[in-house]
Amino acid sequence: MAHLHRGRGYVYSIQYHIVWSVKDRLKILTGEIERKLIDILYEIAKEQGVNVLALQVNLDHVHILVDASPQVYIPNLVKALKGVSAWRLFQAFAELKTRLWGGHLWNPSYFVASVGNNVEEKVRQYILSQKERS
């Protein structure tokens, strides 16, 4: 079960499952790129004030489960996760841009679902099992 957090005058427990894919579903998130992306996503989450509960990078998409405060605006969080990670990956792996049509790493769309306390562990296990399914 998720931990309860306290703010000034409120108590909360909010988790989000977020998924997004590589542009054209190219299978490029492997090896050093995958390892660097994981590090980058943890850094961005920390910068945005959210806690990563589970993270799985697959060949062509990313699953992340985050614990967030009520003040976190999810579209801005997703924009930071996708935009900043693409920028930092392009800095680290310049050849990536040439492998992608139009030089865009991520598909512009994404999936997000709030996760209730009774299913958080199931979502966490689902995310962590995705590597086995790829």
Image: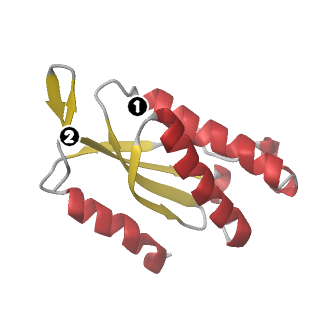
Q: Secondary structure at mark 2?
A: loop
Instruction: Assess disc 2: are there few (<14), some (14-19) or many (≥20) residues with their C-alpha within 10 Å of its C-alpha.
Output: some
Name the disc covering residue 13, or none. 2
Residue 54 vs 134, above or below: the answer is above
Q: How is the image coloured?
A: secondary structure
Which residue: 30% across, 69% down? 125
Q: Quadrant of the N terminus?
A: bottom left
Left or right placement of residue 106 versus residue 18 in this view: right
Q: Quadrant of residue 50?
A: top left
Kindly give the residue lying farthest to the left in the view shown.
118
Left or right placement of residue 78 versus residue 27 in this view: left
Name the residue nearer the viewer: 47 or 87. 47
**Residue 47 percent coordinates (x, y):** 53, 36
Query: Which residue in the protein does label 1 denote?
Result: 74
The span from disc 1 to disc 2 (Cα, nearest Å) is 15 Å
Q: Earlier in the sequence, mark 1 or mark 2?
A: 2
Which residue: 21% across, 20% down? 8
Residue 29 seen in the figure: no
Instruction: Name the amino acid, label 1.
Output: Ile
Which residue: 19% across, 48% down? 3
Q: Quadrant of residue 5?
A: top left
Instruction: Name the amino acid, label 2.
Output: Ser
Residue 53 vs 75, above or below: the answer is below
**Residue 94 percent coordinates (x, y):** 87, 52
Name the disc covering residue 62, or none. none
Kindly give the residue lying farthest to the bottom in the view shown.
132
**Total of numbered circles in the picture?**
2
Q: Secondary structure at mark 1?
A: helix
